[in-house]
Amino acid sequence: EVQLWESGGGLVKPGGSLRLSCEASGLTFPIYAMNWVRLTPGKGLEWVSGITARGTSTYYADSVKGRFIISRDNSKNTVFLQMNSLRAEDTARYYCAKEPGGVVIYHFDLWGQGTQVTVAS
Amino acid sequence: SNELTQPPSVSVAPGQTATITCGGDIIGTYSVHWYYQRPGQAPVLAVFDDSDRPSGIPERFSGSKSANMATLTINRVEAGDEADYFCQLWDSGRDVYVFGPGTKVIVL
């Protein structure tokens, strides 16, 4: 079965850090670009970051640029999101999402179930 | 503006047609995609590249676009179609994905 499985969420204090992981199974992970998207009840879906299939190019929303880092390990079928200097407004459910191709320009044809991140003191 | 707009909610009776709009100055420039998300579930791709439908999505779902407005139409609405619907595009001018704020479809 083709699926994405996120992990690493939790409760963290403002200014803290968290590293999310998303492991893929049932697909040829190294040929697909990957993204992170978050859902907040008040703001809806917000794209956070994307990375090309080989990891050579990365993209970020202005709201997280300079604080979050996306990376991937194709040998482990996993994409990561290192989140630093976390703020209350980063509280959300974080999803990883797959593109149908190797670059970050298409759309998201497969999503994981998400992992909850809560930033609070 | 580079933002997308959607009505907060659309109410429709079972068997009728739901029309969800997505507006913005950049709509005409880029391909628009649509997702739905039921409570507690992951988003699902419903329409991509303005009007293409992924395998597994019923023919009742269709997309269209003109000028600065994209539209998702759901024919013969069923109770299971009740969800939040989001439009999205890749803004290659800024290298960012943009989502609309979402529309809650309420089946009466």
Image (cartoon, helix red, strand yellow):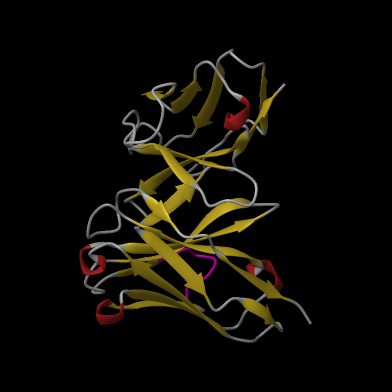
Of residues B32 and B93, the one drawn nearer to the viewer in this rendering: B32
Name of the residue lying farthest toward the front: A1
Q: Please report the bounds of the magenta region as a residue range.
A: A60-66
Name of the residue lying farthest toward the top: B16
What percent of the width, then of the height, locates residue B59? 39, 23
Q: Residue at x 37, y 35 (%)?
A: B56
Q: Which quadrant is the C terminus of chain A positioned in?
A: bottom right
On whether residue B96 falls in the magenta region, the answer is no
- Whether residue A108 appears in this view of the structure is no
What percent of the width, then of the height, locates residue A80? 42, 77
- Whether residue B58 appears in this view of the structure is yes
Relative height, residue A27 to residue B20 (above, below): below
Q: Which quadrant is the N terminus of chain A positioned in?
A: bottom left
Of residues A117 and A105, the one drawn nearer to the viewer in this rendering: A117
Left or right: A3 with respect to A66?
left
What percent of the width, then of the height, locates residue B28? 36, 31
Q: Residue at x 39, y 53 (%)?
A: A110
Residue A74, by quadrant, is bottom left
Left or right: A54 with respect to B40?
left
Name of the residue lying farthest toward the right: A121
Left or right: B12 with respect to B35?
right
Relative height, residue A51 to residue B54 (above, below): below
Left or right: B62 with respect to B55?
right
What percent of the width, then of the height, locates residue B81? 57, 30
Of residues A91 and A97, the one drawn nearer to the viewer in this rendering: A97
